[in-house]
Image (cartoon, helix red, strand yellow):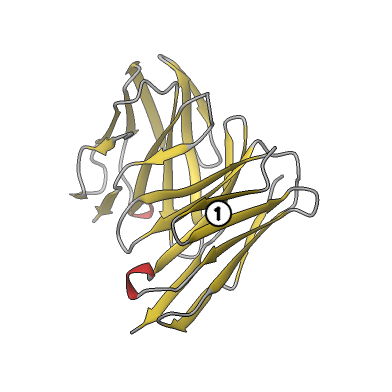
Amino acid sequence: KQEVTQIPAALSVPEGENLVLNCSFTDSAIYNLQWFRQDPGKGLTSLLLIQSSQREQTSGRLNASLDKSSGRSTLYIAASQPGDSATYLCAVSRNNDMRFGAGTRLTVKP
Amino acid sequence: DVKVTQSSRYLVKRTGEKVFLECVQDMDHENMFWYRQDPGLGLRLIYFSYDVKMKEKGDIPEGYSVSREKKERFSLILESASTNQTSMYLCASMGLLTYEQYFGPGTRLTVT
């Protein structure tokens, strides 16, 4: 059974810092990996989707990488802002089966 | 933009009541999902549907049923609500081109 782990569970950084969130998964036979953002009490917002044949995706200040063979993905956030404060979840999917990590709670202090 | 809507943001029900949670998507996606999210347990899949009138059990289907009579609508039913079903319920849809999931805003259900 696929297991997804996110480290660290919580992270606090000063505004302007670059940061990396980590995601690891146990079964490399995935179709894609998706990063989400969740604000308190809200649903999940899709940030980036990386297909299994891709190595990375970029959107604005966000860059996600995928190394399927080692079962790892990273989400890089450049020049962090207080508005980036949220919980970030990664999820891996194979057909209709999507498995989520527990998330990293990010706080960016002004 | 894909839009997934859920019928209620907050809901308070009494133990034993029958509860309906509705989810609608506007992107003609084949697949739809119901999850619940609890602190410390993360997101857990309750049921998913890959076509009209088709459904599959997820990891925690006990105490729940689902209905998909139209492609755009997927309903979660709590036959007899219990306090341990107090949770955040999230609906998602997914197209078969990219397998990217899109989520609704969630329904915070409290059963008293």
Relative to B68, say whether B45 is above or below.
below
Q: Which residue is more in the foreground, A23 or A96?
A: A23
Percent position of residue B75, x then y:
32, 29
Q: Is residue B17 left or right of residue A77?
A: left
Residue B79: image quadrant is top left
Q: Amino acid at mark 1?
A: Cys
Residue under the image location 21 percent in, 37 percent down: B7
Residue under the image location 47 percent in, 82 percent down: A12
Residue B81: image quadrant is top left
**Circle 1 sits in a helix, a strand or a loop, which is it?**
strand
Residue under the image location 32 percent in, 64 percent down: A40
Q: Which residue is more in the foreground, A84 or B16?
A: A84
Q: Which residue is more in the foreground, B92 or A82?
A: A82
Assess disc 1: are there few (<14), some (14-19) or many (≥20) residues with their C-alpha within 10 Å of its C-alpha: many
Q: Which residue is more in the foreground, A108 or B103?
A: A108
Residue under the image location 52 percent in, 63 percent down: A103
- The residue identified by callout 1 is A90
Q: Chain of mark 1?
A: A
Percent position of residue B93, x then y:
41, 32
Q: Residue furthest right?
A: A69
Relative to B72, say whether B17 is above or below.
below
Q: Quadrant of the N terminus of chain B?
A: top left
